[in-house]
Amino acid sequence: MSFVPPGGTIGILGGGQLGRMLALAAARLGLKAHIYSPPGEDAPALQVSDAQTLAPFDDRRALAKFARACDVVTLEWENVPVETVAAISVTTPVLPRPATLGVTQDRLDEKRFIDSLGLKTAKFGHVSATEQGRDAFLQFGEDRAVLKTRRLGYDGKGQAVVRSGEEFLEAFKSFHEVPCILESFVEFDFEASVVAVRGVDGTLAAYDPSENIHSNHILRRSVVPARLSPERTKEAKAIARKIADALDYVGVLAVELFVMNSGALLVNEIAPRVHNSGHWTIDGCLISQFENHIRAIAGWPLGDPARHSDAVMENLIGDEASEWRALAARGGALHLYGKREIRAGRKMGHVTWLSAKTASG
Ligand SMILES: Nc1ncnc2c1ncn2[C@@H]1O[C@H](COP(=O)(O)OP(=O)(O)O)[C@@H](O)[C@H]1O
Ligand SMILES: [Mg+2]
């Protein structure tokens, strides 16, 4: 793949806050961003980009025109249909590759892939529409399990904790009996994630893992460094490398981990994109996850992922963003996404607080 020089155009599928932060990072490098977003959505990336296509993801003509206008195309939403990405890649390289999305868009395929690499996960099983009896739960042999739809879940949507055959059936029905994955309920000590970037030439740079606190399944706060020993920090980064190498991945990916009391690391899921738990890198590192993603897909040398500070990133969810004035006065780095409407559970912005670096991880 040829590299994209300054003045070139990065296409981004999706117009949310991740696209916005990618577009801002591209602009800093003298690159242009062209956003492709379905019409009618409150798409904050449109406000900071050079060109916009507002069309559905299955509009072949719009996709072809978009592809011709871009030097390389990436995505900020991992559930962009694989057909959309495949159509674009006829003309223009798409990174991460369509095949990667095929794996990560299906929670069962994803878990099987992780398992095939010899990495640890929660125990998992397959629930299809034909074996919908309560037996599926009972045979699983756990007193508590998490039922998740195989496709299209986010922020805890499309998943339910079940404790009996009855609860299992109820949850399965509420998901309209679409194919699901059943996972053992992991009694983790805490959650962490590692954000890493892999270049076209296979070089890999990983940020220090963050410890992630969720409430109502939505990321509340990321803290860096995480409470991981230097050995576990190394292991987390090695997990990211193993996954990225196996996918011949180009760009930023995030690996969500469950950290057990024993210190063992279980892989929960892979996000084939820049990640909310990496927002702290904008202020805590010289080169952020967003810039490193742009560098990677444009074929540029990667930037140093070392952090200069400890960081705490707090999401501003729903109404919390209306406190922007008070937040601006408190000394953190305030980021607002420019969304038109405040809604409960919606990520409206974030604040990052820095302090002197304590551990090298
Ligand atoms: N098997 C599990 N055991 C315990 N908690 C889980 C399990 N799977 C998910 N969770 C909790 O739910 C959150 C969201 O689940 P996840 O699989 O990451 O889906 P998504 O982030 O796509 O909504 C996780 O961060 C974790 O807090
Ligand atoms: Mg998750």
Image (cartoon, rainbow, N blue to C red):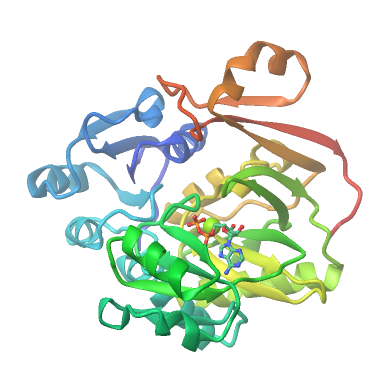
* Quadrant containing ligand 1: bottom right
Which corner quadrant of the image does residue 176 belong to?
Answer: bottom left
Residue 273 screen position, x and y as percent: 47, 54
The C terminus, quarter of image: bottom right
In the image, residue 235 above or below residue 62: below
x then y, percent, for residue 20: 44, 33
In this orientation, does residue 214 appear? yes
Would residue 248 be seen by someone viewing this image from the given angle?
A: no
Front residue of 218/36: it is 218
Q: Is residue 319 above or below residue 180?
A: above
In this view of the protein, which residue sits in the foreground, 99 or 265? 265
Quadrant that contains the N terminus = bottom left
Q: Residue at x 63, y 51 (%)?
A: 303
Quarter of the image where one finds residue 33: top left
Identify which residue is drawn at 62% across, 81% down. Answer: 120
Where is residue 86 drawn, in percent x and y? 21, 62
As rendered, which of 213 and 54 lies closer to the eye? 213
Numbered circles on residues, count? 0
Left or right: where 203 falls relative to 63: right
Horizontal arrangement in the rendering, residue 132 relative to residue 210 (left or right) = left
Residue 182 vertical placement versus 117 (above, below): above
Q: Is residue 360 left or right of residue 269?
A: right
Residue 7 screen position, x and y as percent:
37, 36
Residue found farthest to the front = 166
- Near-viewer residue (253 or 216): 216
Q: In this view, does 178 lie above or below 124?
A: above
